[in-house]
Amino acid sequence: AVDDSTLTFANDAHVTRSFIWDHARILGPGTIVIEPSRQVESHFGAGVPLEIVVENNGVFEFDHLLIAETGGVINNAVLDWDVTTQKTIEGTLGVSPTPSFVNNGVLNKTGVGSLVFGGTFTPITLHNNGHIEISQGILEISQTFHNDGLLSAASGTWLRWEGSSFHTPDSQLDIAGTLSISPFPDDAVHDLVGDVVLTGTLAIQSGTVTLHHAITPGAPIVLERGTLRTDADQDWPAGLHLCCGSSIGGTPTGAGNITLGGTSIFRGTMSGSG
């Protein structure tokens, strides 16, 4: 166990035995490297930040992780997180640069609770280069999200985006649950240039979402506010609910044709060449 002490590593420190990290300050500029088959269980108290980069190749467990500007997490392993209430990963208030959580491996979230990345005033940047799999419950990304891997959400799950998300051409989204684009902030952008399979529900409350591939949601697309653009032809048999203050189409994209089935409601703006 490492408890209420302060350790400084100028070079990388390799964890070759499992241990409990209990309220201790561990400083860089080195990196804590958790070796395969080893587990680190951290019990950080309120206001005690992670001030060093942790590279996980084994198991890294915690309930709440507060990351300072000198800290960060790089996951290269398979992490199975069973969240029954809430697991939060956030940055310390007002730090610059914004700390990051980088997933190069597999992050599988089970349990009915919420996995939360960042907060309104405690930002963290999530980079996904591997696979984030939401098997149960809720994933909330409250700040910037960079996706160069696969993000999947099973039926019955809830995926909530705040802030902007950036997707590479090699990225993948496979959403059978609900994808909710939240009402904060208004200028958030989500340009879905990668492969998108969306058979669940899409609800847009703010920002601008651009589709480059056809999707077939299983429920009416709901635009409460914000803008939805598509430059791919769409067939939405469940319909579209376009509410006050929202828009679909527009420039520079919006050239795709949209075929609607079911019952649709139009109370917003429709534009574009499609």
Image (spheres, rainbow, N blue to C red):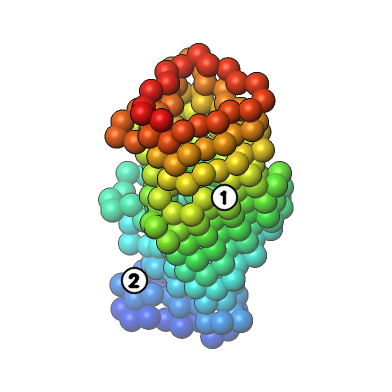
Front: mark 1 or 2: 1
Kind of element beneath mark 2: loop
Q: Is residue 225 depicted above or below 54 in this figure?
A: above
Does label 1 or label 2 sit earlier along the sequence?
2
For disc 2, the marked residue is: 28
Work out how far the residue at label 1 is from the one at label 2, CA to CA, in angstroms: 41 Å
Q: Which x, y percent locates residue 139? A: 58, 47
In the image shown, does 165 or 192 lie closer to the viewer? 192
Write the residue at 51% across / 44% down.
214
User: Where is residue 262, by image quadrant?
Assistant: top right
Q: Is residue 142 depicted above or below 99 in this figure?
A: above
Residue type at numbered disc 2:
Gly
Residue type at numbered disc 1:
Val
Image mark for residue 197? 1
Within 10 Å of disc 1 (Cα), the crowding (few <14, some 14-19, many 20+) is some
Q: Which x, y percent locates residue 228? A: 44, 32
User: Where is residue 253, by image quadrant?
Assistant: top left
In the image, farthest residue toward the bottom = 16
